[in-house]
């Protein structure tokens, strides 16, 4: 369809529908989110893709490690999750490093980014070149959190991380790690699939 043949609103509706598919994909400089984004775009335009391994020098830059976010949340003292990745991928600091820790609210605040001048907005923050972890959320939600300890989790899938390593890092049985990853993958597939489309993995 060309601009000359498009009916009023058609191009805008198509663009909005594309944004609805692309926005939930957790992507950054590298990783599965980038691949999935290119897969979606290749449905619309021809693309020729080439992958360059992490660690490859490119002029004055080095291709960074892949960043594949799997799950993230902040849990309150009552066990209720007050922030979750599934709500918005903006909740996680871009290229955040993994963490699982329990800390008082005052300490957690040092890793939370907000926009006090826009209390209903979730800021978009990244940390490409400095290793740190963090969350982003609406300022009014941060101010409403009562005192008490919170548990923060940022879980990623790295190419060289085994189930055993993840279990040791999270202090969980391997079986629990496997089941949680399976649930996370199922949820991720739901986020990545176009609305109304069901994909069945062949046996």
Image: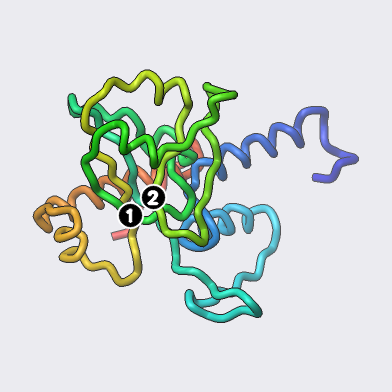
Q: 120 or 34: which is nearer to us? A: 120
- In the picture, measured across the screen, residue 111 lies left or right of residue 57, that is left
Disc 2 vs disc 1: Cβ atoms closer than 8 Å?
A: yes
Tell me residue 109's x, y (percent).
37, 35
* 164 to the left or right of 8: left
For disc 2, the marked residue is: 133
> Does 89 appear above or below 164?
above
- At which x and y percent is residue 144? 37, 18
Q: Position of residue 181 (x, y in %)?
A: 25, 52
Among the 4 quarters of the image, the one containing residue 102: top left
In what element is the residue under mark 2? loop
Structural distance between the alpha carbons of marks 2 and 1: 7 Å
Q: Please rate how many residues cluster around mark 1, counting C-alpha atoms within 10 Å: few if below 14, some from 14 to 19, many from 20.
A: some
Local packing at callout 2 (Cα closer than 10 Å; few below 14, some 14-19, many 20+) is: many
Extreme-right residue of the structure: 4
* Rendered view: 4 above or below 58: above
The residue drawn where x is 29% and y is 51% is 99
- Residue 89 in the image: x percent, y percent? 46, 41
Q: Residue at x 40, y 21 (%)?
A: 143
Q: Which residue is mark 1?
A: 98
Side (left or right) of 36 relative to 84: right
């Amino acid at each position: 369809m060309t601009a000359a043949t498009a009916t009023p609103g058609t191009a805008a509706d198509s663009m909005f529908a594309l944004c609805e598919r692309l926005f939930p994909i957790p992507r950054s400089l590298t990783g599965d989110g980038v691949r999935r984004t290119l897969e979606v775009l290749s449905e619309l335009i021809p693309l020729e893709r080439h992958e360059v391994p992490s660690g490859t020098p490119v002029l004055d830059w080095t291709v960074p490690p892949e960043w594949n976010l799997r799950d993230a949340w902040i849990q309150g003292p009552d066990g209720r999750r007050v922030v979750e990745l599934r709500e918005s991928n903006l909740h996680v600091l871009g290229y955040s490093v993994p963490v699982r820790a329990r800390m008082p609210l005052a300490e957690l605040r040092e890793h939370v980014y907000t926009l006090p001048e826009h209390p209903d907005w979730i800021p978009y923050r990244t940390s490409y070149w400095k290793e740190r972890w963090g969350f982003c959320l609406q300022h009014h939600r941060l101010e409403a959190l009562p005192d008490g300890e919170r548990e923060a989790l940022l879980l990623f899938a790295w190419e060289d991380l085994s189930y055993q390593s993840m279990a040791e890092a999270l202090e969980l049985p391997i079986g629990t790690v496997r089941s949680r990853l399976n649930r996370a993958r199922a949820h991720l597939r739901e986020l990545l699939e176009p609305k109304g489309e069901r994909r069945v993995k062949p046996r």
